[in-house]
Every structure is written in C-alpha cells, then in structure tokens.
Amino acid sequence: MRASVHRFTMRDPGDVSELAVAISAGKVNPAHIVAVLGKTEGNGLVNDFTRGYLTQSLKLLLAEKLGQSMDAIGEKVIFVFSGGTEGVLTPHYVVFSVDPAAQPIAQTPTGKKTLAVGTAFTPVLAPEDLGRIAHVNSVAQAVRAAMAQAKITDPADVHFVQVKGPCVTTERAAEAKARGAQLVTTDPNKSMAYTRVAGAFGVAAALGELPPGQIREDAFFSRLDWFSERASISSGVEVAVNEVMVLGNSAAWNSDYVIAHRPMTDALDINAIYACLADLGIAALGDNTATGLRQIAAAMIKCEPDASGYVRGQRHTMWQDGDINAQRHIRGAVGGLVAGVIADTRIFVSGGDEHQGPPGGGMIALVAKAA
C-alpha cells in the first residue's frame, strides 16, 4: 500500500477547484481518497457552518467524479474540518489517499517505516452517551480498527489520531428529554468540549497512554495531567458519528512520506517544533529558509490557552476577552509561532485541547517527504 498527501488552498469555504484540477490532471485518483483534513475561515464554534459547506462541496465533487451518491462518499471518506483561520493561517485542506495495489516495501535490516493511514467510523451514539464512557469506548474501538487497517501493530508507531465527533444540538436534546434520558449537558458549546474529552480518553485508551484505571468520567476536565499526546479531537453539528483517522509509520507501506509528532509544553514551545523537524531529518534550526522545509506536506497542531492565566510567568488575557473567543486567540498565536518556523501558513491548528497534550500546551505533528 502507498499513502499520498496533497495540500490545497481555498478562496472561500466552498472552493474545491484546486482538487478538481488535480483530479483532471491525474495527480489525484478520487477513488483512492480516504480522508480530508482542513481549516475553514469560520468561527470554529457551534454555528460555524463553513465546515459543513466545505464537506458538502467535496462530497459533490467526488460524487460527480466517481459516479456515486454523496451518501456513499460520506460512508467511506473521513471529512474533518476545523473552523478559524486567525492571524496568518490560510484556509486549506489536505487530501490523504491510499493506493491499495501498491506493493509493500520488503522488510529491511533497518526496518524502514513510511506513512500509513487508517480510518474508521463509530456507530451513531445516543445523545445521552455523548461525553460519557460509552463515547470513550466507542472511539477506542474505532482507533484500534483504524490501526488494524493501517497495519500498525505497535502503538508507538502512531503519531497522530484525528477524531471528529458529534455534539448535542437543541433538537437532539429535546428528543432525549422526551425519552426521559439524562444528558451530560444540554448546552451545545459545553457538549463540544465533552466530545473532545471523551475522544481524547478514547485515543489514550486505544494507544495505552493511560492505564484502564484512569479511563473514568470523574477525571474529565479535572485530571488534565492525564492526556494523550497524539490525539486531536474536534466536534461539530455536521457529523452524527465519530470519524477517526490514524496516521503513523509502518514497514508494510510503500509511501513517499513519513510522520513525526512532539508534545508542546506551552504556547511558546518552539523547541518542540524544531525537535519534530529533526525527527523527520529536516535541518532548519533557526532558519526558516532551509530547503528541507519544502518537504513538509501537512502540519497539524492542537493548542489551548493556559488555564492558570499565565504563560511562563507572564499574565495572558485570552480567557477574559469578551469580544474574541479564547480559542481564536490561541489558534492565531500558536499558528503564527509554527508558521514562522516552517515558513508556511497552511497549518491545521485546532483549539480546545482538553486532555490532548500537556495542560496549557498541546502537540504538533508533521508529515513530510521521506529524506
């Protein structure tokens, strides 16, 4: 199997013209597309419909190219979009494709491993299960299924797990209430946070980052020192199931790309970026004109304003701004930090990293052409 990665920019949330051109030119086989990850220029909150707009536009394009229905496309392709392109961030999306006919690399003494991609969907969860252990277990099972599909047997070879999960809406809350069901919250915005937390614990359980005894609901939001350093969880009204994509490295794949990740201890952790680049064999310490940076094919970040209100001893005001959501602040800040290092503004930066990386920090994952 061979994984390929293509990154496209957008003029607006419904612009899929660059992918259409790439398909027409034979650079991307639409039948091989398994996942699309991207940033749209919305607000990133419950009412951010730019995510659904781009999803619809991509489904329409692929349905036309493959002669299939939009529903059929949605049943086999993962679409994960995060709203909010604050600061220098560029609206874009990354297309992950898998050619199942490509021959695997023969095992070598060095055990060379290249990019492996696996995807999975959970069943539809009842509104009352969102943000609870049933949600955690469902995500964990899907992560294991995606790993198996990617032929990754060692969890240490997994470097990035993206989950897009549903949240409670007013309609779903009313339906559950009519049945007498008790929801963890009826607030859609709070529900998004619970979905992120349940997803993070699900990834941590599947990868063995937390022992079974720590996978429990009373740890949600309270034990922030219990986290997954490879989970990236998003939530939105545009999905009804949890969509899971696992990215790692495997000797069973014949890809031109590799992936690496590093946890970020805080919003200023530039050393984590340099360490991730070094893991990929890219020498760019202090030089964002280094030619090796051109090898980068995708950049993914999770981040969160420090709950203490301080960054390295200095006060920040992100949580107190009544005009701009804190997640918009942190996306712009960390996005600018990473963009300055890699000299590229096409970065998937997602806020809301509860239990996803160190508290007040997060994680960075980079996909690059193999050296």
Image (cartoon, rainbow, N blue to C red):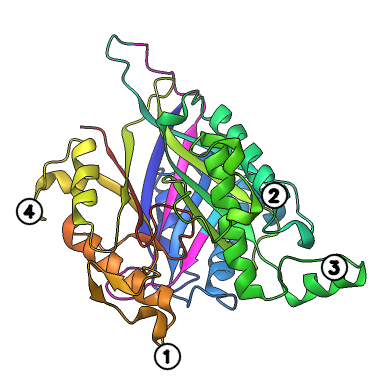
Sequence-first tag of 4 and 2? 2
For the record, the magenta segment spans 81-107
Tell me the residue at 68%/56% (across/down): 70
Specify the amino acid type for callout 4.
Answer: Asp
Sequence-first tag of 1 and 4? 4
Where residue 59 sits in the image (x, y, percent)? 60, 57
Specify the amino acid type for callout 2.
Answer: Ile
Specify the amino acid type for callout 1.
Answer: Asp
Q: Residue furthest bottom?
A: 323
Give yes or no for contact between labels 4 and 3 (Cβ–Cβ under 8 Å): no
Give yes or no for contact between labels 2 and 1 (Cβ–Cβ under 8 Å): no
Say which of marks 2 and 1 sits in front: 2
Give yes or no for contact between labels 3 and 2 (Cβ–Cβ under 8 Å): no
Q: Which mark is residue 287?
A: 4
Q: Quadrant of residue 360?
A: bottom left
The one nearer the camera, 12 or 52, is 52
Q: Which residue is mark 3?
A: 176
* Residue 299 forms part of the magenta stretch: no
Mark 2 secondary-structure assignment: helix
Give yes or no for contact between labels 1 and 4 (Cβ–Cβ under 8 Å): no
Tell me the residue at 65%/47% (across/down): 136
Tell me the residue at 59%/33% (across/down): 144
Q: Which residue is mark 1?
A: 323
Where residue 255 sits in the image (x, y, percent)? 36, 29
Q: Residues within 10 Å of mark 3 (few under 14, many from 20)?
A: some
